[in-house]
Image (cartoon, rainbow, N blue to C red):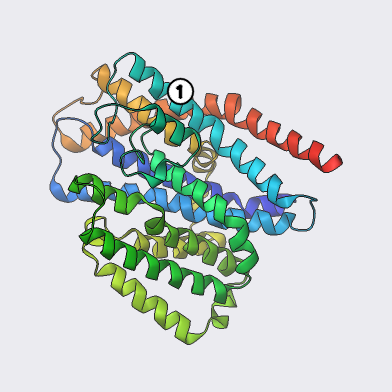
């Protein structure tokens, strides 16, 4: 890939960097005993939408890379899954191992209203199918729900790539996902499968039908960046239906409580387009791009950093709520970046290279 193309893709790393910082901000704000004003707490809580930023960037980059490799490999489908496994599994398995060790040493961990973490729960995380169980979806590795949804999207991706060939079909897919999300959400809200209301409400936000529209927006972003005028190719009826379905999402009680992640997804698409045009270039700075490169490690690691800082009482520093939060955030961020740099170069890169070697051998045979 030419240097020019690499420079044009710098904004994707910057987006990932911004996404992980949003997530760390949110989790930093949840810590400590010094209370913040409600409005500030709600605002900082919006950092949780950084996960949807990740999903959009993921769908965009997958469509772009798969298109570039299309026709250049003998077994693109198998190679795709090899790349995805060696991209996600090593760091996530490290997270599983860490939290299993915590269980053995009887250290605190999130049970998800279960009396204990079962072997089945652990195995479901190893196989990336924990997203189907409301008790398991986020009860072993904090933030593990997003890994489950990411892997489910990977499973569907080759099929979607074959079917979605234009921005028009991408909008049709978005409408299908919005409709299914709305129907499933309303049905499951009134007919829950478990008796714990809070846990069920969390599941209805975490599970795949609720997040799939975000991936659809990432696909739309791909077509818009490939050709900014492509929006003219979308049928007015399809666009109108998209607007209606989006308005229906806004009217949902559950989505109101979660600040409507899909509406945020639309803003993220617009933001991505602006960055791709070279606007707001200050955001694509080397620091943010570097944080974006190590963002997956940081996503797993920052939870661990927070738990150990809390154990050693390094969460609260003063009584001024904003200064206290700022110091906590900077400490969590700096420690997370330091450790994630090690895991990126010692685990992520070597295993990604291993995946590349396996693919190269397959292609030569």
Where residue 101 appears, as percent x and y from the top left, is: 40, 18
Residue labelled with disc 1 = 97
Q: Is 305 located above or below residue 48 in the figure?
A: above
Residue at 43 percent across and 66 percent down: it is: 177
Tell me where residue 85 sits by quadrant.
top right
Q: Is 315 located above or below residue 184 in the figure?
A: above
Left or right of 130? Residue 347 is: right
Where residue 69 appears, as percent x and y from the top left, is: 73, 54
Q: How many other residues sit within 10 Å of disc 1, few (<14), some (14-19) or many (≥20)?
A: some
Tell me where residue 254 sits by quadrant.
bottom left
- Residue projecting furthest to the bottom: 236
Residue at 42 percent across and 42 percent down: it is: 20
Q: Is residue 274 visible?
A: no
Where residue 215 appears, as percent x and y from the top left, is: 48, 58
Left or right of 332? Residue 66 is: right
Q: Is residue 336 visible?
A: yes
The residue nearer to you, when weighing 273 against 105, is 105
Residue at 37 percent across and 51 percent down: it is: 207
Residue at 17 percent across and 36 percent down: it is: 321
The residue nearer to you, when weighing 4 against 310, is 310
The secondary structure type at the circle numbered 1 is helix
Q: Is 37 located above or below residue 118 in the figure?
A: below
Which part of the image, by quadrant, shows the C terminus? top right
């Amino acid at each position: 890939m030419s240097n020019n193309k690499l420079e044009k893709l710098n904004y994707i790393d910057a987006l990932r960097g911004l996404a992980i910082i949003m997530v760390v901000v949110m989790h930093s704000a949840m810590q400590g005993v010094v209370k913040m004003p409600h409005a500030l707490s709600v605002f900082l809580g919006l950092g949780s939408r950084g996960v949807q930023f990740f999903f959009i960037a993921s769908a965009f980059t997958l469509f772009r890379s798969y298109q570039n490799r299309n026709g250049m490999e003998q077994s693109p489908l198998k190679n795709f899954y090899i790349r995805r496994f060696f991209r996600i599994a090593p760091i996530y398995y490290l997270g599983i191992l860490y939290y299993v060790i915590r269980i053995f040493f009887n250290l605190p961990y999130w049970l998800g209203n279960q009396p204990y973490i079962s072997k089945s729960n652990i195995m479901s995380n190893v196989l990336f199918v924990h997203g189907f169980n409301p008790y398991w979806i986020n009860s072993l590795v904090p933030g593990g729900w997003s890994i489950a949804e990411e892997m489910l999207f990977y499973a569907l991706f080759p099929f979607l790539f074959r079917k979605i060939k234009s921005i028009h079909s991408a909008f049709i897919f978005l409408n299908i996902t919005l409709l299914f999300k709305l129907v499933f959400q309303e049905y499951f809200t009134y007919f829950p499968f478990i008796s714990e209301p809070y846990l069920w409400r969390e599941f209805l936000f975490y599970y795949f039908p609720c997040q799939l529209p975000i991936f659809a927006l990432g696909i739309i972003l791909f077509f818009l960046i490939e050709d900014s005028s492509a929006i003219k190719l979308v049928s007015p009826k399809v666009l109108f239906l998209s607007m209606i379905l989006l308005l229906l999402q806004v009217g949902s009680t559950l989505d109101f409580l979660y600040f409507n992640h899909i509406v945020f997804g639309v803003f993220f698409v617009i933001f991505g387009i602006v960055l791709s045009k070279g606007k707001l270039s200050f955001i694509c700075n080397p620091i943010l791009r570097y944080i974006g490169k190590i963002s997956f490690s940081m996503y797993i690691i920052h939870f661990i950093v927070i738990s150990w800082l809390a154990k050693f009482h390094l969460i609260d520093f003063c009584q001024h709520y904003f200064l206290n939060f700022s110091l906590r955030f900077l400490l969590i961020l700096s420690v997370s970046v330091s450790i994630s740099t090690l895991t990126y170069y010692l685990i992520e890169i070597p295993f990604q290279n291993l995946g590349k070697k396996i693919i190269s051998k397959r292609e030569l045979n």
